[in-house]
Image (tube, helix red, strand yellow):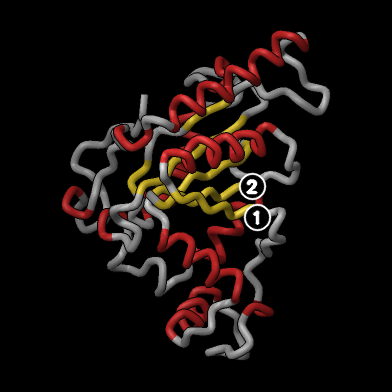
Amino acid sequence: MNVLIVHCHPEPHSLNGALTAITADTLTPQGHRVVISDLYAEGFDAIEHPRHYRNRQDSQVFSALTEQRHAFEGGQLPEDVAREIQRLEQAELVIFQFPLWWHGPPAMLKGWFDRVMVYGGMYSGSRRYDHGRLKGKRAICAVTTGSPAEAFEPAGRAGDIVRLMYPFHCSLYYLGLEVLPPQLAFGIQGGGLAYQEETAFRRHLESTKTDWRARLKGLEGESTIPFSGWDDWDEQGRLGLRHPLRWR
């Protein structure tokens, strides 16, 4: 299996860095091919901007979607975007490794979506959701949080983690990916915030690594999060019966 890790953390020696290393060290001996897109280390430019398009379709008004489609159809995508798309096309499993910052992914990872998921290439009006270009591939988010698990329960002060993760999961499904329930590492304290004394926290870190290593070995047999599809929606994109989407 070809595995792509989209790693987004500025510190190589962080827990996120350790979890990415564990992923590679666990899957490679099993015969899987692992490629890492380390967004910070590779200096990925997360800002969509006119400077990325030298041969514009419209030189007067910049429309990102228009220029993305024009560049894709003309084989003139920016080099870093073309590289990331090639990695996605080769992958059968995509692992997103990142910390939860301000109730969402880091800005660089959001910018990766803004630039790499080019209109007309990675999706279009007719190629979305269960008709998406990446259909048949799977994805999983491995996420670290600062607050403990209890704070992310439905009535927790940090917000229901299922709802917080939904926009990211929905974006993955929008592209056609089948989404596995996330791997969540809660209570990764830092910056002066502490929920455990140091010895207990170190045990927590080691347990987090052990849990991820164990789960990696069985990912291929796991079920994905159920999503509705085109056959389930009316002309306005509504389900006949509304219900919250939860993986647990």
Local SS, label 2? loop
From the top left corner, tell me how far across and down residue 111 is, in percent. Answer: 61, 58
Residue at the image point whose x is 62% and y is 36% from the top: 100
Q: Residue under circle 1?
A: 39
Residue at the image point whose x is 37% and y is 49% from the top: 1
Q: Residue under circle 2?
A: 8
The answer to whether marks 2 and 1 mark residues whose Cβ atoms lie closer than 8 Å is yes
Which amino acid is tagged 2? Cys
Residue at the image point whose x is 18% and y is 48% from the top: 232
Residue at the image point whose x is 73% and y is 42% from the top: 12
From the top left corner, tell me how far across and down residue 125 is, in percent. Answer: 32, 68
- Is 83 located above or below residue 91 in the figure? below
Which amino acid is tagged 1? Leu
From the top left corner, tell me how far across and down residue 18 is, in percent. Answer: 65, 34
- Is 52 located above or below residue 158 in the figure? below
Residue 102 in sight in this render = no
Which of these two is toward me, 175 or 12? Answer: 12
The Cα–Cα distance between marks 2 and 1, rounded to whole angstroms, is 6 Å
Q: Quadrant of the C terminus?
A: top left
From the top left corner, tell me how far across and down residue 63 is, in percent. Answer: 55, 77
Residue 115 in sight in this render = yes
Q: Which callout, 2 or 1, points at the residue further toward the start of the chain?
A: 2
